[in-house]
């Protein structure tokens, strides 16, 4: 059950501490049986403050000059300067509490990198508005969990924050890494000239490569501006990969597919997406990357409408069925002997570790402890009972109701998957 824990909160920059701040309440403990232990509290384990100021507010179609200040809970300022900002997202771009793309700028107007909240030095960031996530922690929980599964999994690092926009309190947001090639993010070769390494995001616009086995297309994220030879090499690799998948489904010869694709990445992304029941998973909520000397790996993204939020739309709200849309690529993967053998084995391993129910719920507790009284402030600004998506969300009258619903649904989902993972 959710208990509101009071935590210190700064409205803006405060004095710089002489000594490192103590661990905030709710700092996650080491996870038994899976993932890397948390050796020490990080800046992402505490609530941050974001202050954005723009003469003209950003839109989805227009990037505008703004200023952004990022302040840690202890008052230290990680960035205070110029930023180009724009409204990001699809349906979330239309809401009253949108998210933003951010590109940090220096005094000379050029892009500049900054290490925000110990997430690594970069210029590209995302501020997630968390409008549809009434629990406020779905995305961060999923990204953290995917990394904690181990096996070299990458997912975006993020921090829970409160945003002030032009002096007006705008509620809880998340500061998130943009998924791209970087030594502090996806650490792969450049790929500009030879196309041997790349990062993709699945969309249905800004297409680089049109998919034949799954929804929409791949947009090329990195390299940002490949040479003609580099672009041709990436295109040829993707076409060859799809052909190998189709051939394996017909012939049963899977060795080349698992040379080109990381099996454990396929298994782990299926586990996380299905546990959360992310109905958007195989549409436009997936990213992928290929290192120079390895197979394609997958990255979850955009988990805000999960945990059965959609009882008003088909089976989307039910905890006892698989994700409704499973395109051909994922049907073929699911039918492969390697996935059929590894998926239940991996599920059993993780259920003794980070997916053990009390451990998973403790992770939610820790994230809620970071938020503390910000949950109340966010609800006062954006009453939870008014948040919906086309009349399809289940109704809740308070954050406590949402928390109870998620915990009950998650328990049901875990037990159902225990019984049915062999038949995925």
Image: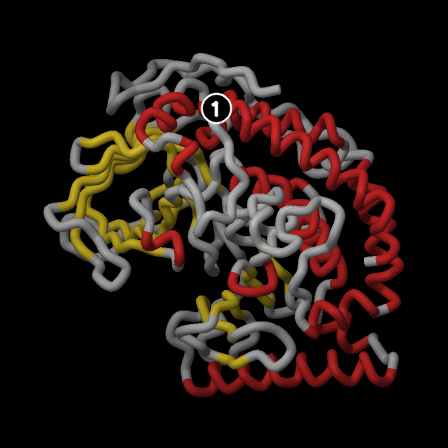
Residue 2: x %, y % from top left: 57, 20
In what element is the residue under mark 1? helix
| In the image, residue 125 above or below residue 15 | below
Q: In this view, does 228 lie to the left or right of 407?
A: left
**In the image, residue 296 lies at what x, y percent?**
64, 67
Does residue 350 sit above or below 404 in this rendering?
below
Q: Is residue 8 left or right of residue 401?
A: left
Residue 2 visible, this angle: yes
Give the quarter of the figure containing the C terminus. bottom right
Please give the residue where the numbered disc 1 appears in the rendered image.
370
Location of the N terminus (image quadrant)? top right
Occupied quadrant, residue 9: top left
Q: Kindly identify the residue that appears in the image at 41 percent across and 82 percent down.
A: 227
The foreground one among 55 and 389 is: 389
Q: How is the image coloured?
A: secondary structure
Left or right: 72 in relation to 239: left
Nearer the observer, 224 or 207: 207
Q: Which of 76 and 249 is in front in this view?
A: 249
Q: In which quarter of the image is residue 27?
A: top right
x then y, percent, for residue 137:
51, 35
Asked whether residue 200 is in view, the answer is no
> How many C-alpha atoms fall within 10 Å of the one at disc 1: few (<14), some, or many (≥20)?
many
Residue at 72%, 64% (x, y): give it.
Answer: 262
Residue 125: horizontal and vertical position, in percent?
A: 37, 49
Q: Is residue 108 above or below residue 28?
A: below
In this rendered view, identify the residue nearer to me: 127 or 378: 378
């Amino acid at each position: 059950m959710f208990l509101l824990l009071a935590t210190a909160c700064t409205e803006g920059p405060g004095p710089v501490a002489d000594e490192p701040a103590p661990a905030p309440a709710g700092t996650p403990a080491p996870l038994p049986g899976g993932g890397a232990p948390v050796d020490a509290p990080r800046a992402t384990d505490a609530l941050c403050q974001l202050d954005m100021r723009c003469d003209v507010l950003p839109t989805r179609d227009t990037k505008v000059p703004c200023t952004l200040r990022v302040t840690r809970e202890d008052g230290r300022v990680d960035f205070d300067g110029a930023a180009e900002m724009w409204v990001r997202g699809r349906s979330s771009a239309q809401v009253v509490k949108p998210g933003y793309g951010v590109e940090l700028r220096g005094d000379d107007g050029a892009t500049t990198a900054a290490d925000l909240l110990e997430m690594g030095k970069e210029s590209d960031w995302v501020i997630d508005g968390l409008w549809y996530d009434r629990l406020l922690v779905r995305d961060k929980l999923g990204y953290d969990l995917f990394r904690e599964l181990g096996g070299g999994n990458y997912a975006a690092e993020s921090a829970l924050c409160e945003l002030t926009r032009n002096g007006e309190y705008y509620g809880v947001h998340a500061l998130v890494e943009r998924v791209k090639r970087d030594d502090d993010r996806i650490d792969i070769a450049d790929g500009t000239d030879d196309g041997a390494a790349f990062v993709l995001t699945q969309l249905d616009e800004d297409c680089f490569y049109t998919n034949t086995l799954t929804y929409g297309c791949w947009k090329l994220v990195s390299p940002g501006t490949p040479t003609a030879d580099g672009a041709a090499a990436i295109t040829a690799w993707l076409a060859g990969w799809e052909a190998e998948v189709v051939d394996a489904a017909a012939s049963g010869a899977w060795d080349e597919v698992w040379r080109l694709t990381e099996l454990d990445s396929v298994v782990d992304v299926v586990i996380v997406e299905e546990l959360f029941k992310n109905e958007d998973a195989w549409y436009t909520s997936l990213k992928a990357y290929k290192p120079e000397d390895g197979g394609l790996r997958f990255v979850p993204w955009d988990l805000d409408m999960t945990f059965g939020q959609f009882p008003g739309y088909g089976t989307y709200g039910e905890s006892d069925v698989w994700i409704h849309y499973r395109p051909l690529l994922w049907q073929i993967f699911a039918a492969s002997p390697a996935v059929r053998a590894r998926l239940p084995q991996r599920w059993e391993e993780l259920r003794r570790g980070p997916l053990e129910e009390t451990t998973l719920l403790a992770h939610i507790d820790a994230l809620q402890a970071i938020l503390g009284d910000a949950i109340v402030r966010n609800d006062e600004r954006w009453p939870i009972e008014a948040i919906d998506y086309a009349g399809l969300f289940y109704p809740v009258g308070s954050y406590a109701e949402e928390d109870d619903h998620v915990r009950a649904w998650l328990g049901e989902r875990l037990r159902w998957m225990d019984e049915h993972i062999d038949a995925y």
